[in-house]
Image (cartoon, rainbow, N blue to C red):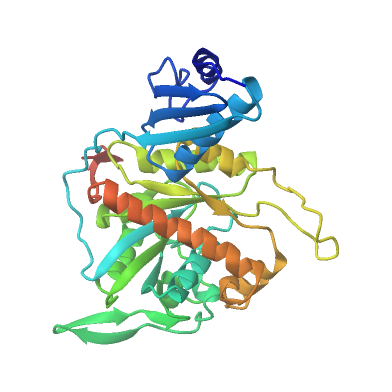
Amino acid sequence: MKLNKQDILDALKTITTPGDGVNMVDSGAVKNVVTFADEVIVDITITNPSLQAKKRTEVDIMKTIHDKVYEKAKITVNVKVDAPAKPATNVIKGKAIPGIQNIVAVASGKGGVGKSTVTANLAVTLAKMGFKVGILDADIYGPSIPIMFDVENERPLAVNVDGKSKMKPVENYGVKVLSIGFFTQPNQAVVWRGPMAAKALNQMIFDAAWGELDFMLIDLPPGTGDIHLSIMQSLPLTGAVIVSTPQNVALADAKKGVAMFQQESINVPVLGIIENMAYFIPEELPENKYYIFGKEGAKNLAEDLQVPFLGELPLIQSIREAGDIGRPAALQTATELEVAFENLTQNVVQEVVRRNDDLPPTEAIKITTMAGCSAVKK
């Protein structure tokens, strides 16, 4: 069959490129279409630099041509990325921590979606890959990282660094950890106002001997509140990872979390979204997969918000049990869980590398208090 260029263009008018509101032909994204016999070459330019957007564009074009023009067509799609100008960054620089290369916040709009579990397993997987890793447990009112690393009874020691006394983070499984949980009793509630919490966080950030780290992961509390602003005021974050279940209630809050980081006055790159508790496979029925909280909700949200989808994690009892006994599930070897966490972590690292290549360094925000309300400014 000899393909017709106009037929190809008519078919491409039925789809859009990620981020565009009009079809890819009328938007000018399609730069050229060449046909000969049963072969077609499509040259297209998109503005979204993520690997996910490029792959989705390629798949959409091939599927549309096969469905609407000729199912046996041989198709080549050349996708070029023409990213927009680099966004302006905030002008107030935060205090970078000497020796720490990347600071990644792990956040969730809603509690109970497994944010701390994901943080712990990301950290141990990074350490297994050979990176130097630390975790700052910034969940002041509900610290759980010490339990997950089996160090809840440990206390940071004081060490002398350049004539100054500093806290030495507690270390286990190759990960350095600091948490407010080290300084409170298990049955003691932390009843602090914002300024007290911010002061405690600053001490764990700047009065600690973190040493050389490739990655510092910050386990943020749920929501979008004062602790989040304090962290972004204190540190220039490399980026943020959002954790959500596929449930609509969780997705609504996750969307707010993405929106917080993307505010013009905050401008922290969102590295992507992780879908936790994506599905359940019973041991006695290994061929069955149950989508208890909904199917691909976080993946669809990532596409809608034009941020990378970093991967999904199953709802497995052993993940919970591993966290409860203080040995993150990613430490298990030769298991599907180890592979799942490795794939997830590799995607996070890839997005960090891409972010550092494509964007200028993030700068901390300036927070002022006006008439009793917090205002975020550049």
Could one spot residue 37 in this view of the protein? yes
- Which is more toward the observer, 117 or 335? 335
Q: Residue at x 30, y 42 (%)?
A: 267
Q: Residue at x 48, y 81 (%)?
A: 173
**Above or below for 329 versus 35:** below
Relative image position of residue 288 (x, y in whole percent): 81, 54
Relative image position of residue 161 (x, y in whole percent): 19, 83
**Above or below for 360 versus 124:** above
- Which is more toward the observer, 168 or 153? 168
Which quarter of the rendering shows the C terminus? top left
Which quarter of the rendering shows the N terminus? top right
Relative image position of residue 31 (x, y in whole percent): 37, 23
The answer to which image quadrant residue 51 occupies is top left
Q: Residue furthest right?
A: 284
**In screen coordinates, is 276 left or right of 231?**
right
- Which is more toward the observer, 156 or 343? 343
**In screen coordinates, is 210 left or right of 281?**
left
**In screen coordinates, is 88 left or right of 46?**
left
Could one spot residue 186 in this view of the protein? no
**Above or below for 65 versus 352:** above
